[in-house]
Amino acid sequence: MPDDPRADVTEPTPSCPVEITLAALHGRWTTLVIREFLQGDRTFTELRHALPALSDKVLSDRLAHLTEAGVLARHRQSGWPPRVSYTLTADGRRLGPVLQALWDWGAEQQLSSPETR
Amino acid sequence: MPDDPRADVTEPTPSCPVEITLAALHGRWTTLVIREFLQGDRTFTELRHALPALSDKVLSDRLAHLTEAGVLARHRQSGWPPRVSYTLTADGRRLGPVLQALWDWGAEQQLSSPETR
DNA sequence: CTGAATCCCTGCCGATACTG
DNA sequence: CAGTATCGGCAGGGATTCAG
């Protein structure tokens, strides 16, 4: 990874692959939302129930952001009441291992330094 | 990972392993600073030269933050001029695979969606 | 040389209210 | 049902200046 042309960078640029991923995961609640989708499709209301403390606005923001990042796909079912479901894309599913890596480091960290300060 | 007691969480909490890791990586420039250390020890001035657009204050903040997160260790060489070097801890070295996972996803993403918008 | 203190500015997040 | 509009508070990040 240091032996990649794209690693020749001296400032944070959106073209760095690491930045791309962090941008996709960016924002409070984002990883929890993704975790929901790793267990299957979800609608707006289902997410609201799974994450009660998450406000409508932020949930809406996150879904839009993840959709734009290529992680989620939006599906409008026509008819009434309006129903929209979201699914992980193939790219979104590839985030599983990424979250796993984040989880693993944090879990190990909890062991090696239970609490500093 | 969904089959872990610590995954029963309905809001972002600092005790979630994923949050711990994201907290360690948090902040602009942080991953670039870590990348420097994956290639060896560095002093304040060396980092300043490697990342010219990074201000003193933010560099200082990042070093303090990473030290507190257990990623870096600080070593004061006594004498004059004052010289301080930083090294990755064992935990810090374990971030290599994490950054690799972030890199891989982002790199793949660049291929599958070169530019949207 | 290696930072810490201060100031300002921007962007995120949350709450509330409203619409197709 | 599934969002958008608006507003306010607060924390992050940059520039500059000062200190051990």
Image (cartoon, coloured by chain):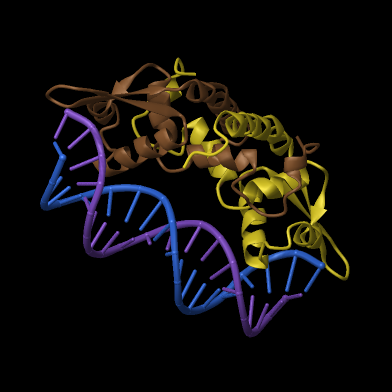
Chain colours: A yellow, B brown, C purple, D blue
Is the N terminus of chain B in the top left, top right, bottom left or bottom right quadrant? top right
User: Viewer-proximal residue, A36 or A79?
Assistant: A36
* Residue A83: x %, y % from top left: 83, 63
* Residue B44: x %, y % from top left: 26, 29
Q: Quadrant of residue A59?
A: bottom right
User: Viewer-proximal residue, B94 or A62?
Assistant: B94
User: Viewer-proximal residue, A96 or B83?
Assistant: B83
Query: Eyeballing the image, is A5 above or below A23?
Result: above
Q: Quadrant of residue B63?
A: top left
Write the residue at 44% across / 33% down. Answer: B31
Is residue B7 rendered to the left or right of residue B56? Answer: right
Is residue B21 rendered to the left or right of residue D1? Answer: left
Query: Eyeballing the image, is D3 above or below B57?
Result: below
* Residue C17: x %, y % from top left: 63, 84
Write the residue at 68% across / 31% down. Answer: A100
Write the residue at 69% across / 29% down. Answer: A97
Write the residue at 31% across / 38% down. Answer: B59
* Residue B29: x %, y % from top left: 39, 37
Is residue A95 rendered to the left or right of residue A42? Answer: left
Residue B91 visible in the shown view: yes
